[in-house]
Amino acid sequence: MKRCRIVFPLLIAIILLSSCGITDNKQTNEIKEKATLTISAAISLTDALEEMKPIFEKEHDVELTFNLGGSGKLAQQIQQGAPVDVFISANQDWMDILEHEKLIQSDTRKDITGNKIAFISSKKTNLSIDSLEEIDQLDSVKQIAVGNPETVPAGKYTEQFLTSLNKWDELQDKLILAKDVRQVLTYVETGNADVGFVYESDAKTSNQVNILFTADTTLHDPIVYPAAVMSDTEHEDLAKDFLRFLESDQAQDILKSYGFNK
């Protein structure tokens, strides 16, 4: 009887410890199972996406990770095998390339929003230019920052705009090429460039620059931001949910508040 009295409490203790271990393992697995969704997106979307992040994460119990940069650089990373779930480009060309290479799910491709090209100066310069023609009259404008047209959609739109006005070749000696549109903004803010071409949405994020004018939209390709789910995503349903969220009224209102518009 004494042996039974000893064995029985030990058996209970073993069962309790085992159940605790199962519970701990279950909780650990639940933590590990929380998905991380990687979004490669045009850097001009930075502020809008950061505002959307907690809203989507709360509704879907997921962690969003943003990889932000020039659309061309991001597309090249994807071509080289970078793990991405959703790509948002600032132009159609780079999305077309990825679609041709079957790196995106074509049926998920959607046009999310749009933008305008703005010509900006630092508030410290007190420049007053209502049109591009007036640059010729201002000797003080020696450096003009633009995104590199090879990889930065904003730079490509700018090149089209300036070419339409026969100014691209004429202004070559004054152009400073930047890796993305936010670098253009920084160049103008810090005085490393007198003026620059950015998206209107980028200009509106800064209290250090003035918008001198916006480019005539008939003089460059339409500025459209397409988004798509990647072909090799491991989180297809969540990625599709994120695209649907981008089209929602809530997300569109956030985009509009930062100067974007379809």
Image (cartoon, grey):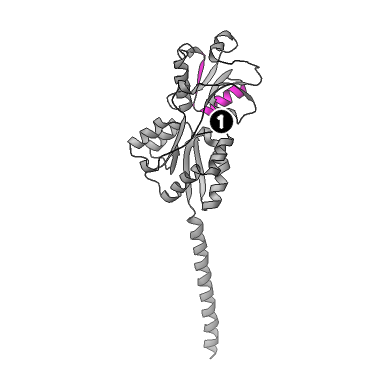
Magenta span includes 180: yes
In the image, is 25 to the left or to the right of 120?
left
Drawn side of residue 190 relative to residue 95, left or right: right
Please tell me how many numbered marks the rendered image carries: 1
Which secondary structure, mark 1?
helix
What amino acid is at disc 1? Ser
Residue shown at 45%/24% (left/top)?
Answer: 156
**Residue numbers of the magenta segment:** 174-192
Residue 10: percent from left, percent from top: 53, 79
Residue 74 percent coordinates (x, y): 44, 34
Q: Label 1: which residue?
A: 201
Vertical side of 96 occupied by 174: above or below:
above
Q: Is residue 147 visible?
A: no
**Residue under the image location 59 percent in, 36 percent down:** 257
Residue 81 percent across, percent down from the top left: 38, 40
Which residue occupies the extreme left position in the image?
A: 101
Rendered position, 105 above or below 151: below
At horizontal 52% and vertical 67% (from top left) the residue drawn is 23
Q: At which x and y percent is residue 102?
A: 33, 39
Depth check: 176 or 122 in front?
122
- The image quadrant that residue 94 belongs to is top left
Magenta stretch: includes residue 82: no
